[in-house]
Each structure stands twice: as structure tokens, then as C-alpha cells.
Image: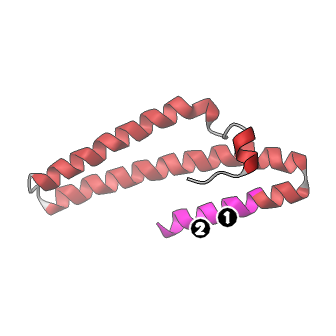
Amino acid sequence: MTTTADETSTPPGYSDTKEAQLKRLRRIEGQVRGIARMVENDTYCIDVLTQVSAATRALQAVSLGLLEEHVAHCVVDAARESDEAAAVKVDEVVAAVTRLVRS
């Protein structure tokens, strides 16, 4: 994970919901361990795929929540700072959305 200089001096946009995000991620972690057990136990393919789909949707929900918080906090703060700072943050958001759409 990389951070830039300004990211280390400012708390992330999700800092207010950090515990909730961690709780969701731990739940997803449990889902993924369950999927691994299903494969170890030779569970029917479609049943495994159903659980993979559920875990994927859960990760997408976390991603969208983080994206929303980034825009609401980091991008808005940058826009208040300067047009140049806002442009950098908007470019970051576009790149992040592009990665999310491709995944």
C-alpha cells in the first residue's frame, strides 16, 4: 500500500467509520475462509460460486463506501484548498473507479 506525503498528515476519509469498515471486512474474511472450506470439502461448484458472488458483492459494497467517504472528505477538502489540489483528487477518484469497474 502506498501513501503520499499529504495522506500521512491527514486522517483518511473513512476515519469516522473505521470500526464499521473493519467489522465488514472481518465478516468478508470469514466468508472467504468459508469458501475455502467448501472447496476443501468438494462442495458443489454452483454453491461455491454463489458464495464467491456474495463475497464479491460485499467487497464491492465496502469499496463504494470508501469511495463515497473519499469524495465527501478528501476531495471536498482538496477543492477547498485549491483548484490544483482538487484536480489531483478528482484524477485519483477517476483512476480508482476505473480499477473498480475493471475488477
| Residue 67 part of the magenta-drawn span | no
The residue that mark 1 highlights is 94
Q: Amino acid at mark 1?
A: Val
- Residues in magenta, as a range: 89-103
Q: Main secondary structure of the magenta part?
A: helix
Q: Is residue 14 depicted above or below 90 in this figure?
A: above
Which residue shows up at 48% across the image and 48% down it? 61
**Where is mark 2, residue-wise?**
98
In x, y percent, where is residue 37? 16, 48
Label 2, label 1: how far apart the Cα atoms are = 6 Å
Task: Identify the residue at horizontal 47%, vertical 53% (top origin).
Answer: 60
Residue at the left extreme of this rendering: 42
User: Which is more toward the observer, 72 or 6?
Assistant: 6
- In the drawing, does residue 1 fall left or right of residue 88? left
- Display coloring: secondary structure
Q: Seen in the image, is 84 located left or right of residue 28?
A: right
- Residue depicted at 55% across the width and 65% down the height: 99
Amino acid carrying label 2: it is Thr
The answer to whether marks 2 and 1 mark residues whose Cβ atoms lie closer than 8 Å is: yes
User: Within 10 angstroms of label 1, few (less than 14), some, or many (20 or more) residues?
Assistant: few
Question: Which residue is found at the position 63% from the left and 34% from the top?
Answer: 15
Q: Where does the image place residue 34, in percent across and percent down from the top left? A: 22, 45
Residue 49 placement (x, y as % from top left): 24, 60
- Crowding near the residue tagged with mark 2, few <14, some 14–19, many ≥20 C-alpha atoms within 10 Å: few
- In terms of secondary structure, where does tag 1 sit? helix
Q: Nearer the viewer, residue 34 or 4?
A: 4
Viewed as shown, does residue 31 lie left or right of 16? left
In the rendered image, which quarter is residue 33 located in? top left
